[in-house]
């Protein structure tokens, strides 16, 4: 089976699937596209015009990171999904919650035009993180000792927050001890470190400099 992951180089949803592929040592190739100049073949392939896409044997297409991750997990040994149906469903729900947190983080950094708008999104993100903190156990991962698809779904959130914090710190983990430990455990994994491009932080910063958002001015100062 040949797998090709179609990606945008900063997309956290692509990173979710890239982590799963790397963690499970699945052979694949990755193709990066420019979302501002999308190739025609991509427009014809993607139902929503978004990444990630997973092309299977060139002629079968999967989209949506959660679906792609479950497919990868199901075709490989040592499942990352939990066996218990209720616990598995609860994990899926928290994966969706993670997508909502990613949207809050994106709006905070890439859409907010003023400091007030930025802080409103930051407060929404932080409120969500507090709710997530209450769900975590002793770790090091979401379900305890065992890495799961929920972990691969949240690692990109921490990657994005760290990149934004390097430009202008807004998210403080000091009163989120469980999330802080979880974040450290995830970012220490080679599958997470290798799931982004080598110059991710600088490309992330540069992507903001031409915009008119609140964060853009701080990004330009760091450039």
Image: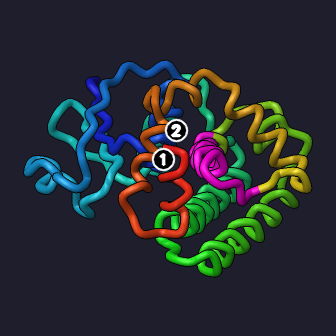
> Badge 1 is on which residue?
205
Whether 189 is drawn above or below 55: the answer is above
Residue name at image x 61 percent, y 73 percent: 118
Q: Badge 2, how many Cα within 10 Å: few under 14, some, many 20+?
A: some
Percent coordinates x, y for residue 30 in the rendering: 31, 30
User: Horizontal placement of 85 versus 60: left or right?
Assistant: right
Q: Residue at x 60, y 79 (%)?
A: 117
The residue wearing badge 2 is 201
| Residue 14 appearing in the image | no
Tell me where residue 138 sits by quadrant. Answer: top right
Residue sitting nearer the eye, 219 or 76: 219
The answer to whether residue 140 is left or right of residue 160 is right
Asked if residue 55 can be seen in this view, the reply is yes
Res 59 → quadrant: top left
- The residue most toward the left is 40
Magenta residues span 152-171
Say above or below: 126 vs 149: below
Magenta stretch contains residue 162? yes
The residue nearer to you, when weighing 220 against 163, is 220
Q: Quadrant of the N terminus?
A: top left
Q: Position of residue 159 (x, y in %)?
A: 60, 43
Query: Main structural element of the magenta stretch: helix, strand or loop?
Result: helix
Where does residue 199 sit, x and y in percent of width and height? 46, 30
Q: Secondary structure at mark 1?
A: helix
Q: Is residue 157 above or below residue 196?
A: below
Does 45 lie within the magenta span?
Answer: no
C-beta proximity under 8 Å, tags 2 and 1? yes
Compute the Cα span from label 2 to label 1: 6 Å
């Amino acid at each position: 089976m040949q797998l090709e992951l179609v990606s945008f180089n900063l997309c956290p949803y692509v990173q979710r699937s890239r982590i799963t592929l790397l963690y499970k040592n699945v052979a694949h190739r990755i193709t990066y596209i420019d979302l501002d100049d999308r190739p025609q073949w991509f427009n014809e392939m993607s139902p929503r015009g978004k990444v990630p896409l997973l092309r299977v044997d060139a002629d079968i297409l999967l989209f949506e990171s959660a679906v792609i991750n479950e497919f990868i997990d199901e075709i490989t040994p040592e499942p990352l999904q939990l066996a218990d149906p209720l616990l598995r469903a609860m994990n899926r729900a928290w994966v969706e919650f993670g997508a909502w947190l990613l949207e809050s983080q994106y709006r905070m950094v890439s859409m907010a035009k003023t400091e007030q708008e930025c802080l409103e999104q930051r407060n929404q993100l932080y409120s969500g993180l507090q709710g997530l903190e209450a769900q975590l156990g002793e770790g090091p991962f979401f379900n305890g000792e065992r890495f799961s698809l929920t972990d691969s779904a949240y690692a990109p959130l921490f990657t994005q927050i760290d990149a934004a914090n390097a430009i202008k710190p807004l998210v403080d983990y000091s009163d989120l001890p469980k999330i802080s430990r979880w974040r450290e455990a995830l970012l220490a994994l080679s599958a997470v470190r290798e799931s982004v491009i080598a110059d991710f932080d600088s490309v992330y910063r540069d992507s903001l400099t031409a915009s008119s958002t609140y964060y853009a001015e701080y990004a330009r100062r760091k450039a």
